[in-house]
Amino acid sequence: MSMFIHVVLPVFLIFAVGFIIQKWKKVDIKPISTVAIYILTPALVFRTFSTSELNKDVFYMVVFALLLLVLLIGWNKLFARWKKLDSATESGIILSTAFKNAGNYGAPIILFAYGETGFTIAVMYMVLQSIIMNSFGVYYAASGQLGVRYALKTVMTMPATYAMIAAIFFKVLPIDIPTNMMLPINMLADAAIPTAMVILGMQLGNIKVTSFDWSLIGFSVVTRLFISPVIAFLLTLWIPMDPMMQKVLILSAAMPSAATIVMFAVQFDSKPQLVSSVTLVTTIISIFTITGLLILLG
C-alpha cells in the first residue's frame, strides 16, 4: 500500500489534473504539446546525455529495446494469423501492445521509485522509445504503405533526436558547457516531465470510447501489461546489465499503451477505436499492475 501512496498515486494525481482540465475547459492540447516536444523535452534530453556516462550499458539498452519490439511484434502476428485478422486490425493490436508510454508515464514513476539514478536511465530509454515509436510506429500505423523512407523522415523531424546528437557531440569532443548556458537548459528540463504528465491526462480526457471488442482488448491488455514485462525480465537475464537498469527496463516494459500512438492510428486509420480503448483500459488497470510490479522489483 505504501508503494501505491508514495509512487503511483502522486503520478496519477497529476494525470488527473490534466484530465479534469481537459473535460472542463476543452483546452487545445496542440500548443502545449508543441512547447513540450520542441523546447522542454529536448532540454531534458540534452541535459541527460551531456551529464551521463555513455558506456556499454547504452548499447545493451538499444539491444534490449529492439529485441523486445521484435518479440512483441512476432507475438502479435501469431495471434493475428490464428484469429485471421485483417491487416488494419493487425496493425491496430501491434500499435496497442508494442509501443508503451515510457516517457510521460514511465519516467515519472521511475523518478518517484528509484530517484535520479533510475530517472537518468529512464530518460535515455524514453528517447530510444521515441525514436522507435516514430519510426516503426508510423510504419505499422500506415500498414507499410508509406515505407521506410517516410518513417526515417519522421524520426529526423524530432527535436529530441538533434538534442541527443548535440549532447553526444559535446560529450565526445569534449567541450565544457558554460554554467550560464546550462542554467536555462536545466530550468526547461525541470519543467519537461510535469508538463508531459499533464498533457497525458489531457490526452486521456480526449479519448472517446463508444464500444469495446473485448477479445482484442483483452489480448492487447494482457500483452501490454503482463507479457511485455515477462519478456523484458527474460531479456535482462540474458543481456548483462546492472540491477538498477534491469529494474528500470522491466518497469518501462510494463507501462500502458502510449497515448501518442492513438494519433498515428487516427491519422492512418489503423483501428483508432481499438487503439484508443486499449490505451484507456491499460492506463486504468496499470494503477494496480505497476504497483504490484514495483513491490516485486523492490
Image: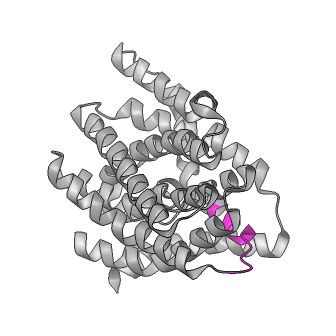
| In the displayed structure image, the side of residue 58 where residue 275 appears, left or right | right
Q: Which quadrant would the N terminus be assigned to in this image?
A: bottom left
Residue 124: quarter of image = top left
Q: Is residue 259 magenta?
A: no
Colour scheme used in the picture? one colour
Asked if residue 12 is positioned above or below residue 106 in the image, the reply reads below
At a point 31% along the width and 72% down the height, the residue shown is 294
Residue 212: quarter of image = bottom right
Residue 66: quarter of image = top left
Asked if residue 35 is positioned above or below residue 12 in the image, the reply reads above
Q: In x, y percent, where is residue 231?
A: 28, 60
The count of marks equals 0
Q: Which residues are magenta?
A: 200-211
Q: In x, y percent, where is residue 236?
A: 21, 53
Q: In x, y percent, where is residue 153?
A: 62, 28
Q: In x, y percent, where is residue 289?
A: 39, 77
Asked if residue 210 is positioned above or below residue 79 in the image, the reply reads below
Q: Which quadrant would the C terminus be assigned to in this image?
A: bottom left
At a point 40% along the width and 33% down the height, the residue shown is 49
Q: Is residue 203 magenta?
A: yes
Asked if residue 125 is positioned above or below residue 23 in the image, the reply reads above
At a point 48% along the width and 42% down the height, the residue shown is 132
At a point 51% along the width and 57% down the height, the residue shown is 94
The answer to whether residue 172 shows anywhere in this view is yes
